[in-house]
Image: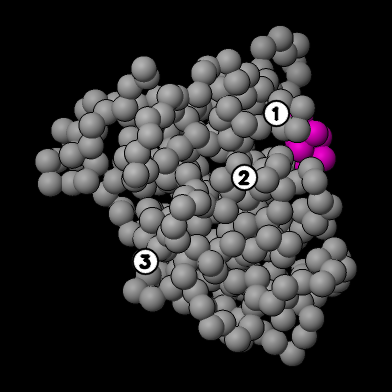
Amino acid sequence: MSKFFEALERSQREPAPRTRASASPAPADQSATLRPASPSAGVEPGAPARVEAPVVEAPAAATRLAVDRPRRAAEHLVSLFDPTSYEAEQYRVLRHVVETLRKGANLQILALTSAGVGDGKTTTAMNLAGSLAQSTHARVLLADMDLRRPMVAHRLGLGGAKHGCVDALLDSSLTLDDVVQNLPHFNLSVLPAGRPAVAPYELLKSPRLEALLDEARQRYDFIVLDTPPFVPVPDCRLIAKCVDGFLVVVAAHRTPRGALAETLDLIDPGKVMGLVFNGNDSHHPGYYDVYAGPSSKAGRRRPWRKA
């Protein structure tokens, strides 16, 4: 796990970017890169090679939440609503990693989690699912399994849902058809959390959860779960038995090293697919402006620089 902690330490050493007072949020110029895993140092001859999971750095602005006014789905789901942006390209990098793992490691149900609250896991889950759904041949389901603080339906602007995940867990007569909504004009299905859960732990502990996700396996190529943070509540430890792998979202300048270490200790090492390093403040490569072209939104942006 050394690459994980190197990335986290780097983020904590670097000062947070200075911001200027403004009536509107800053443009999304921050970059995100995928760093390939490297073999562990000091491996004894003849010992099996250790392969570290990749660390993906996600764009900061794409996952920044606004607190001064409501956000529309288009502002959260850049992978579908702004597919030519630099931020959307970074989610495609993450998509490529997941598609590769799907073939090599039979990764079908992927859960997004974090060490604590506010690290950007929900927005990352939404945009990963949106990026996967850009393939017309892929059947993609985005499921809100954070029954304590569900946010997916709110951010996507899904209203008037009659049923959701909680209802399906309580009522075995409900099928996925009864609780899943299709995002209009996009190749993406969404399973909202639904009604407030009185006892989330008991719901997730029931055999109904596994049955519901088994049904999803039969119908979808990729199932992306937005799950609760791993450390503060035990919910994710119950969900773990039903998923093929976890992506852990790490927020730059925010996630404590100790909390990340505890999270990785709690997750089965065989199910840790990698880290999404969220909030990277380095600017994107200059050639991207030329590649995107002057008519694209990304091409009109001014590169971000440290003060």
Magenta span: 261-268
Q: Is mark 1 on a helix, strand or loop?
A: loop
Q: How crowded is mark 1: few (under 14 residues within 10 Å), some or many (20 or more)?
A: some
Where residue 295 appears, x then y in whole percent?
12, 46
- The residue sitting at 53% across, 83% down in the picture is 160
Determine whether label 1 and label 2 are within 8 Å by CB: no
Where residue 200 appears, x then y in whole percent?
81, 66
The residue identified by callout 2 is 118
The residue identified by callout 1 is 256
Q: How many labels does the image show?
A: 3
Q: Horizontal placement of 115 versus 221: left or right?
A: right
Rendered image quadrant of residue 183: bottom left
Q: Does residue 291 belong to the magenta stretch?
A: no
- The residue sitting at 77% across, 72% down in the picture is 197
Measured along the vertical axis of the image, is residue 17 above or below residue 262?
Answer: above
Q: Which mark is residue 136?
A: 3
Q: Horizontal placement of 129 versus 104: left or right?
A: left
